[in-house]
Amino acid sequence: MRVRYSFSSRRTRRIAKIRKQKPKYPELVEKIIEISDIILQVLDARFIEETRNRGLEREIKKQKKKLIFVLNKSDLVLKLKSKPSPSVTISCTKRKGARELRALIQKEAKQIKKKTGKVLKGDKIKKSLEEKITIGVIGYPNTGKSSVINLLVGKPKAKTAAEAGYTKNLQKIKLTKDIQLIDSPGVIPKEEYSGEDKDAIARHTKVGGRSYSQVKEPEIVVSKLLGEYPQIEKFYKINAKQNAEILIEKLGRQKGFLKKAGKVNEDQTARLILRDFQEGKIKI
């Protein structure tokens, strides 16, 4: 007897296969796009354009998949810039926007024609249940993809951490009986990633794509941030005239971050500034 498996069961096997693999993160995210019906691209509301992955957006469009922009961390921005469409503005920490996002997901899901097939049950071939809609969640590291999933589900199902790149494996989570979510590792666009380009490193650190604890030469990143965001000086109540050396020197002494002979620990002080910036303590 020839057994035919449903499209749904094939997709389940493909998800399981991806879990077992250890590919580079960009390739893993591309595979998630391939198996998903709808894609949620999570962006940092403070840095909407900087956290968009144009390469993945082109791939989503090429595969004719539905794309929804999720503007997270809206509580950290004083004024929201122009928004891509379709988009939903949310704040995971304030638990705002979940209802609107669920409604848009369900609206888009209803427009997708779900396939049915046949599946083996016991010794008989029976018609399978309708296939679940798969929602892939993608975005830069530290934009809050796992937090968005937890907000949607209403429970802490996806593992989260403030550390950039915390999610390293694929996580499949049930949203409704008809819809499942797939979390993914955060990725920086291939064409932008660099271990040497100081401007690129500064940009990625600014949006949280690189953790304050991992970036090399944090003083250089602080210098670039200070030139763009004078709010940093106001936050620490230090007049440094947008000079990073002065800011680090004064703040280091203020915090008692000193080395031998009373010299300021510049690395420790610079990382404190980057941490405060990445964690949203400094409003921009």
Image (cartoon, rainbow, N blue to C red):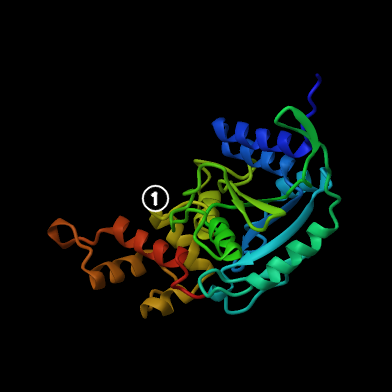
Q: Quadrant of residue 63?
A: top right
Q: Is residue 35 left or right of residue 194?
A: right
Seen from the viewer's position, the closer of residues 55 and 71 is 71
Residue 187, position as x, y percentages in the image: 58, 46
Residue 69, position as x, y percentages in the image: 71, 61
According to the picture, the residue beneath numbered tag 1 turns out to be 217
Residue 229, position as x, y percentages in the image: 51, 71
Task: Determine whether 69 is above or below 122 in the image.
Answer: below
* Residue type highlighted by circle 1: Glu
Label 1: element kind = loop
Identify the residue shown where x is 86% and y is 50%: 113
Seen from the viewer's position, the closer of residues 79 and 117 is 117
Check the picture and name the quadrant holding the N terminus. Answer: top right
Whether residue 146 is visible = yes
Q: Is residue 107 left or right of residue 134?
A: right
- Residue lying farthest left? 261
Task: Determine whether 41 is above or below 251 in the image.
Answer: above
Tell me if mark 1 has few (under 14), some (14-19) or many (20+) residues whose alpha carbon lies within 10 angstroms of its own: some
Seen from the viewer's position, the closer of residues 210 and 268 is 210
Identify the residue shown where x is 45% and y is 71%: 242
Task: Determine whether 174 is above or below 151 in the image.
Answer: above
Residue 174, position as x, y percentages in the image: 62, 53
Whether residue 84 is visible = no
Q: Quadrant of residue 104?
A: bottom right
Q: Is residue 141 left or right of residue 109?
A: left
Numbered circles on residues, count: 1
Seen from the viewer's position, the closer of residues 62 and 274 is 62
- Residue lying farthest front? 123
